[in-house]
Amino acid sequence: MTGAKSDDGADFVVTRRFDAPRELVWKVYSEIAHLKHWWGPKGFTWIGGTLDFRPGGMFHYGMRSPDGHEMWGKFVYREIAHPEKIVFINSFSDKDGGTTRAPFAPDWPLDVLNTVTLVEHNGRTSLTMRGGPFNATAAERARFDAMRPSMDQGFAGTFDQLAEYLAAQSK
């Protein structure tokens, strides 16, 4: 699955450098005991989840928003290359793991293909997440493109939480 691309190749890309070795970043990205402490939008509370971290396996998670709404999502893993790459389809889901429409936009893509790569240099790790609509309609691709500023803000918050969590793990 090397070189997996979204529908049109116009991926959303986020890169963040963490003051942690790649093995630690990999560990907190690949174990539910860690994911539940940092994954998701800032201000959301973890309410449950499961993880089967292997190609074909799934990370299924639930969160509660600050105003009390439940939101479920899932990653279905396509490729895992320890410790440098994770490729997965990300979708909103119901409590049972069935794919659903996003609660905020009925024309959000059902599936978003993401590739996370980790590169270490001098004990610091650069994480790059590249993602885009997969098997999406033109309207879904347009909605994805329109949401880029919101995704920038959302992933900044998520990766801020990851940075804080990594700092606590390094002590």
Image: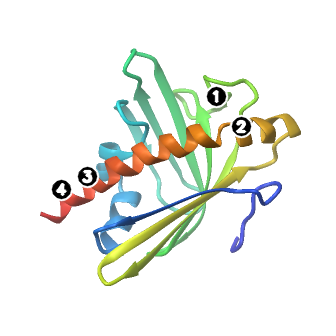
Q: Is residue 110 visible?
A: no
Residue density around tag 1, few if under 14, some if 14–19, many if 20 or more, within 10 Å: some
The quarter in which the N terminus is drawn is bottom right
Q: Is residue 30 visible?
A: yes
Contact between marks 4 and 2 (CB within 8 A): the answer is: no
Going from the N terminus, do you reach mark 4 or mark 2 first? 2
Look at mark 1 in the image and give the residue it sits on: 102
Residue drawn at (54%, 30%), measured in percent from left and top?
96
Please name the colour scheme applied to the rendered image: rainbow
Q: Viewer-nearest of labels 2 and 1?
A: 2
Q: Viewer-nearest of labels 3 and 1?
A: 3
Identify the disc placed on residue 146.
2
Going from the N terminus, do you reach mark 2 or mark 1 first? 1
Q: What is the spatial separation of the Cα atoms under label 4 and label 2, in whole angstroms?
A: 35 Å
x and y percentages locating residue 34 in the rendered image: 30, 52
Image quarter of residue 42:
top left
Going from the N terminus, do you reach mark 3 or mark 2 first? 2
Going from the N terminus, do you reach mark 3 or mark 1 first? 1
x and y percentages locating residue 76 in the rendered image: 59, 51
Q: Amino acid at mark 2?
A: Ala
Look at mark 4 in the image and give the residue it sits on: 168
Q: What is the spatial separation of the Cα atoms under label 4 and label 3, in whole angstroms?
A: 6 Å
Asked if 167 appears above or below 104 in the picture, the reply is below
Give the SS element for disc 3.
Answer: helix
x and y percentages locating residue 6 in the rendered image: 75, 56
Give the SS element for disc 1.
Answer: loop
Outermost residue to the bottom = 122
Give the SS element for disc 4.
Answer: helix
Contact between marks 4 and 3 (CB within 8 A): the answer is: yes
Residue drawn at (35%, 30%), measured in percent from left and top?
43
Residue drawn at (76%, 49%), measured in percent from left and top?
134
